[in-house]
């Protein structure tokens, strides 16, 4: 499968409607991005079950900011709507294949359970901070 350029408007639906989505955040002026691009494209041809997307950080500055991109290229991997990998820097083909294999091998029941526990802990912590501690006058 070839890589697909996506915009901020397409990002959420792409992640929500596909099992595995890789996102390459890049820019035209970025040397390492240009080095990684052909590798990313070549590996995409070997994995028709994975959606390989690209986000131009210059054209999609708001999306890049919302995603917390501070260095490019940055590769993110989503599986069943969960961000399971995020790393800046250009990967070689073998490293990219290892990331894909690891994402495919994840026990998603365990991942979803972990996410649910983390969300519950965050909600509980937020509840303790919302007015439960009244400062003394």
Image: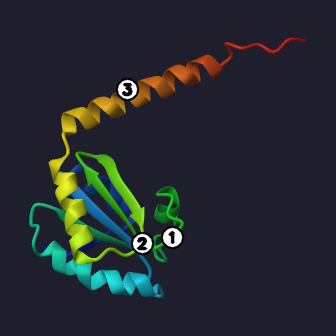
112 sits left or right of 7 in the view: left
Q: Who's the residue at 44% across and 80% down the image? A: 27
Disc 3 versus disc 2: nearer the observer: 2
Name above or below for residue 117 compared with residue 34: above
Name the image quarter holding residue 94.
bottom left
Q: Who's the residue at 51% across and 58% down the image? A: 68
- Circle 3 packing at 10 Å, graded few (<14), some (14-19), many (20+), is few
User: Marks 1 and 2, how far apart in space?
Assistant: 8 Å
Q: Which residue, given by chain and number where applicable, does mark 1 sit on?
A: 71
Q: Which residue, given by chain and number where applicable, does mark 2 sit on?
A: 89
Name the image quarter holding residue 93.
bottom left
- Report the front residue among 53 and 92: 92
Residue 127: horizontal and vertical position, in percent? 57, 19
Q: Which residue, given by chain and number where applicable, does mark 3 sit on?
A: 117
Q: Using the rendered image of the protein, determine whether residue 23 is visible from the camera's viewpoint.
A: yes
Residue 47: horizontal and vertical position, in percent? 11, 67
46 sits left or right of 38 in the view: left
User: Marks 3 and 1, how far apart in space?
Assistant: 30 Å
User: Cβ–Cβ below 8 Å for labels 1 and 2?
Assistant: yes
User: Marks 3 and 2, how far apart in space?
Assistant: 30 Å
Circle 1: element type: loop
Chain-order first, disc 1 or disc 2? 1
16 sits left or right of 137 in the view: left
Residue 75: horizontal and vertical position, in percent? 36, 66
Quarter of the figure that contains the N terminus: bottom left
Chain-order first, disc 3 or disc 1? 1
Chain-order first, disc 3 or disc 2? 2
Quarter of the figure that contains the C terminus: top right
Rendered image: mark on residue 129: none
- Circle 1 packing at 10 Å, graded few (<14), some (14-19), many (20+), is few
Q: How is the image coloured?
A: rainbow
């Amino acid at each position: 499968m070839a890589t697909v350029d996506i915009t901020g408007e397409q990002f959420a639906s792409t992640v929500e409607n596909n099992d595995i989505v890789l996102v390459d955040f890049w820019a035209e002026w970025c040397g390492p991005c240009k080095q990684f691009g052909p590798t990313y494209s070549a590996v995409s041809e070997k994995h028709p079950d994975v959606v390989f997307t690209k986000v131009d950080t210059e054209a999609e500055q708001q999306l890049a900011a919302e995603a917390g991109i501070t260095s490019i290229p940055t590769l993110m991997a989503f599986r069943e709507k969960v961000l399971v990998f995020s790393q800046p820097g250009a990967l070689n083909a073998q490293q990219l294949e290892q990331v894909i294999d690891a994402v495919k091998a994840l026990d998603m029941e365990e991942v979803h359970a972990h996410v649910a526990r983390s969300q519950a802990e965050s909600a509980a912590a937020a509840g303790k901070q919302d007015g439960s501690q009244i400062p003394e006058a």
